[in-house]
Image (spheres, coloured by chain):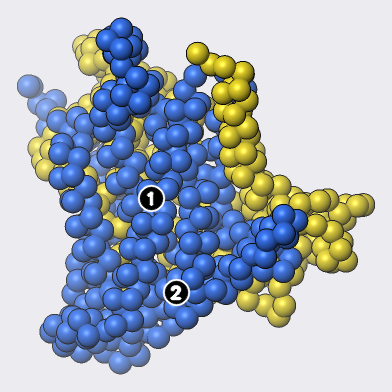
Amino acid sequence: MTTPFRRTALYAALAAGAFVSVFPYLLVVLTAFKTRRQLSTTEPWLPGLPPSTANLAEILGGDFPRFLLNTVVMTVLLTLGQLVFTTFAAYAFARLRFRGRDVLFWLYVATMMVPSAVTVIPLFLIMRELGAVNTWYGLLAPYILGTPYGIFLMRQFFKSLPGGLEEAARIDGAGPLTVLFRILLPLCRPAIGTLAIITVISSWNSFLWPLIITSGDETKVVTVAISALKVGIGVDRGLMMAGGLIALAPMVAIFIFFQKYIVRSVVLTGLK
Amino acid sequence: MRGGRRLGDWYAYLFVGPSLLGVVAFLLLPVVIVFALSLFRWELLSPPVFVGLENYARLAGDGEAWHSLGVTVLYVLLCIPLQTVLALALALMLDRRIKGVRILRSLFVIPWMATPIVMGLVWDWIFDPRDGALNRALDLIGVTGPDWLSDPAWALPAVALVNVWQHTGYTMLFFLAGLQGIPKELYDAASTDGATPAQRFWKITLPLLNPTMFFVTVTNLIGAFQVFDTIFVMTDGGPSKSTDVLNFRIFGTAFREFDFGYASTLSMLLFAVILLVTLAQVRFFGRRTTYDLS
């Protein structure tokens, strides 16, 4: 059924698509290592020889490392918060009985419908009222207590675990905390890994909220810093791509090492 | 159930507590605030003034706002059908045991985790009329490319292409999972009955992918309606407001013109549009989600 011709056509189509997927990354790497002179004399898709680290040195010599550190701190704290609070809430919704549980859960599902674009203005005004504009508190507070989407995903996972798991422990007198930490969490590692990866990526890449809530350098993150590179005098592509390379590299590394968790995020939605 | 039931209640409230605080303070309260503010005139410096429906009356006659809504809808129409069809086609091509299939799948997903701000700048560079990779490559085959991002006719499709580039691969993963959930016996039975590949696709594959189709179009549409990052770094809403999508206009109205009342009214418009489109999809797909919400 699969003739050699069809097989070749299939591979050609896939290879073309894969090339388009990867090309912008390639361009970042190539351009970041070009001198200004090489940039104007070589085709964009060819490397500048010899490669130059001048752009990287220039960007790392400025305030950029500080913004990078801010992004790392923001990403770590948001991810930790998401994991802790989401796991507790999802566990309660999936495995505990308490008054008001179903009503509360429907409330969470309903808030999943609220677009983040709609909450940005009121969030800014709330933070302004609290004197939290341009502070770590303002940057982190709205997103550190766990998201309804994360709770929804984790609840699905908790529900998929067999119901008898807790019974035996309960008979031995274990409380909900012991059950969660000793019995359920070890089984949840794949789901927790997936949630962590998704949160790391979305925190690292976040832009609109940091842009609005940050006015000085204290809490400025990499995305905001990079967007400002285009507004300066003249456009220095090499410098921009060097900044881009630094911002992209950790995400690509995460992708390479934790791919299976990303694939699992699809399965976790329960659509399979 | 003994006294343990009450203890259990307490534990549960303790566990849910922090996230509930987040949901109430940072999701529900903002929705209430944005609605309330849409009834006020407020430029931050002076106290807010209640104006009733004045902002909505202004919206009704605000040609630029409706233009922004039109641009947003056009953007969504440029992104979603193309991206969905491409993702499905890729999934069909990669849902087989061929050499290198795992690596190919990975390569297609890799755009998904790219920082949109960075990729906005990269594509801005690719679309550069003189030095950009796209027009340089077109030169090689003797075609003179347009001034992509400075041409009102091309700027929006160009920005939409970035979105398609970023989200096609991840969407493909959902289709792949969906395809793998279709029992192979169905295809065997259809082949025995003499069904052509096209018939098998339209009568088996597509209908059984319905839940996946529903999920990916709903989530991708909601995302596309809120596009901001790429517009911010690539076009700043121009040229001639041809990429002035609604979320970008909301941002400008609030944080550049400090017109927070009217920006809230525009937010309500975006909210209403997203809600209506999502509800329309729920009806179109003729089913509730496949989630077990019990």
Q: Indicate the position of residue A221 as horizontal and vertical percent values.
A: 57, 62
Give the quadrant of the N terminus of chain B: top left
Label 2–label 1 contact, CB within 8 A: no
Letter of the blue chain: B
Question: Is residue A27 found left or right of A219 in the rendered image?
Answer: right
Which amino acid type is marked by label 1?
Answer: Ile
- Label 1 crowd bin: few (<14), some (14–19), many (20+), radius 10 Å: many
- Nearest the viewer among B139 and B254 is B139
Question: Is residue A177 found left or right of B82 in the rendered image?
Answer: left
Decide if residue B150 is in sight here. yes
Q: Which mark is residue B80?
A: 1
Question: Is residue A226 found left or right of A136 in the rendered image?
Answer: right
Which amino acid type is marked by label 2?
Answer: Ser
Q: Which residue is mark 2?
A: B242
Question: Is residue A24 found left or right of A175 in the rendered image?
Answer: right
Q: In this picture, is B211 found above or below A239?
A: above
Query: In the rendered picture, chain A carries what hue?
Result: yellow
Q: Which mark is residue B283?
A: none
Residue at x 31%, y 37% (from the top left corner): B213
Residue at x 91%, y 52% (from the top left corner): A49
Indicate the quadrant where residue B110 lies: top right
Q: In terms of secondary structure, where does tag 2 sit?
A: loop
What's the chain of the residue with tag 2? B
